[in-house]
Amino acid sequence: MYRNILVSIDLGDPEHETRTLETAVDYARTFASRLHVMTVVPDYGMSIVGGFFPQGHEQDALDHANKALHEFTKKHVPADIKHRHIVGHGSIYREILRYAGVVKADLIVLSAKRPGPEDYLLGPNAARVVRHAQISVLVVR
């Protein structure tokens, strides 16, 4: 039923994300799917903000995220599950939706935390992915 599963991991909260990845692994095992495990390094939204950081900081952040993602999956994805790593950069929900198309995902798995007051105005990333995705989305709480 699902050949390619995109699972988005927030490396800023690895304890909470363990359950999300375990759920995706269960689906991958059940359907003999390939996992595409991704994390997103957010951008600043405005280019002027980037000027306050040293040159090369974005590449350093991407390299750090890639290393952390590999370490996280090494702990939580069994060797028999086919998987790959993706590090996106930019708007979190847009990168998730973009990579869902790139990898031809049949299912997106992501976590949702209890929304804070700021989320009611802008909407959390999970809500935006659910609202705009062309495929099924599994939200793990």
Image (spheres, rainbow, N blue to C red):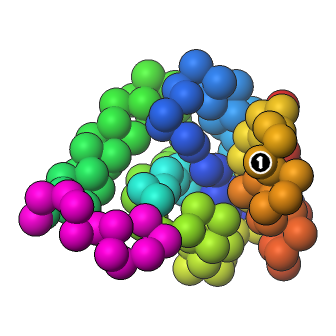
On the question of residue 46 being in view, the answer is yes
Q: On the image, numbered disc 1 is attached to which residue?
A: 118
In the image, which residues are magenta? 44-55
Image position of 122 with respect to 115: above or below: below
Residue at 33% in and 36% down: 68
Q: Circle 1 sits in a helix, a strand or a loop, which is it? A: helix
Apparent side of residue 22 relative to residue 136 in the rendered image (left or right): left
* Residue at image location 34% in from the left, 67% down from the top: 49
Predominant secondary structure in magenta? loop
Q: In which image quadrant can residue 126 be found? A: bottom right
- Front one among 113 and 120: 120
The x and y percentages for residue 46 are 43, 75
Residue 69, horizontal then vertical, whole percent? 39, 41
Residue at point 65%, 24% (across, down):
16
- Amino acid found under the numbered disc labelled 1: Glu
- Circle 1 Cα neighbour tier, 10 Å, few/some/many (<14 / 14–19 / ≥20): few
